[in-house]
Image (spheres, helix red, strand yellow):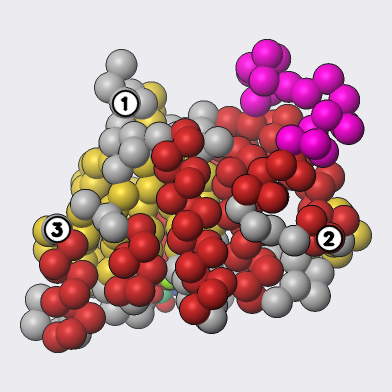
Amino acid sequence: MPKTLQIKNLQVSVVNQQTDERTTILKGVSLTVKPGEVHAIMGPNGSGKSTLAYTLAGHPFYEVTGGQISLDGQDILEKSPDERAAQGLFLAFQYPVEVPGVKVQNFLRLAYNARFADHPEKLFPSVLAFRKHLESLAKELKVNPELLKRGLNEGFSGGEKKRVEILQMAVLEPKYAILDETDSGLDVDAMKAVSLGVKKIIEKYNTGVVVITHYQRILKYLQPEFVHVMKAGKIVQSGGRDLAEKMEAEGYEKV
Ligand code: ADP
Ligand code: MG
């Protein structure tokens, strides 16, 4: 079985709820991510980057009108978001949701149990055993353990939200992860902590990662081997890390 996250000629539309009008957003996107690889996707606002992330997650709003997505050889287009997560796909969204009243540690335990439902050998014998595991991961990723006892994202600062999201990523041991503007709105220290955390996870679980970003600075830490530029629903250029520098210096217009 090929070990890749493979996106082939993906076409995605959204339907406007008011007017019933259909707009095509992704117009044939292809991307192949292997375990341990880091890919960056850059591109102007509105080019379809988040649409790609949501479609990979299986968000029902986005209608796939053509193309394929497969994970380690298995077609995932017909699978629910939970089934995709259980296959090892992880998505960190641009705007993390608040779930007041649900403690981070409980949320993460349920997410872990769902992720590994088909792997009984991975399940922890008790709530306490999971908590120990979680606390050691938090320590490793320099996440304040006090946050684990608070409601998910409830009153969290931008930096705290992203750190907890990276902790969630570590908990889920993803095969593939898509990080949608995880660096936006972070101060330098938080950005560094988040990128070093992602790096650790890649090393530990050989995760294949797609980072969606506007900025060079996160790429300095993550060192993607592949950089893609998305424009108007298509990947219009791919290259190495120098392409990211060029984009930041020259802007997207010339591409
Ligand atoms: P990016 O993340 O690259 O900034 P998006 O994927 O968020 O771009 O958006 C791409 C285009 O799709 C935009 O023109 C946006 O308005 C449109 N779009 C995305 N989601 C929706 C939606 N839920 N309803 C209507 N239009 C949408
Ligand atoms: Mg976006």
User: Looking at the picture, does residue 200 appear above or below residue 234?
Assistant: above
The amino acid on which the numbered mark 1 sits, given as a three-letter code, is Lys
Residue pointed to by mark 2: 146
Residue at 21%, 70% (x, y): give it: 244
The mark nearer the N terminus, 2 or 3, is 2
Q: Label 1: state its secondary structure.
A: loop
The answer, for residue 13, to whether it is visible in the render is no
Q: Label 2: state its secondary structure.
A: helix
- Name which quarter of the figure residue 4 lies in: top left
The amino acid on which the numbered mark 3 sits, given as a three-letter code, is Gly
For marks 2 and 1, give the CA distance.
Answer: 38 Å
Q: Judge the density around disc 3: few (<14), some (14-19), many (≥20) Cα neighbours within 10 Å.
A: some
On screen, residue 140 versus residue 199, left or right, reads: right
Residue at 38%, 48% (x, y): give it: 209
On screen, residue 82 versus residue 128, left or right, reads: left
The mark nearer the N terminus, 1 or 3, is 1
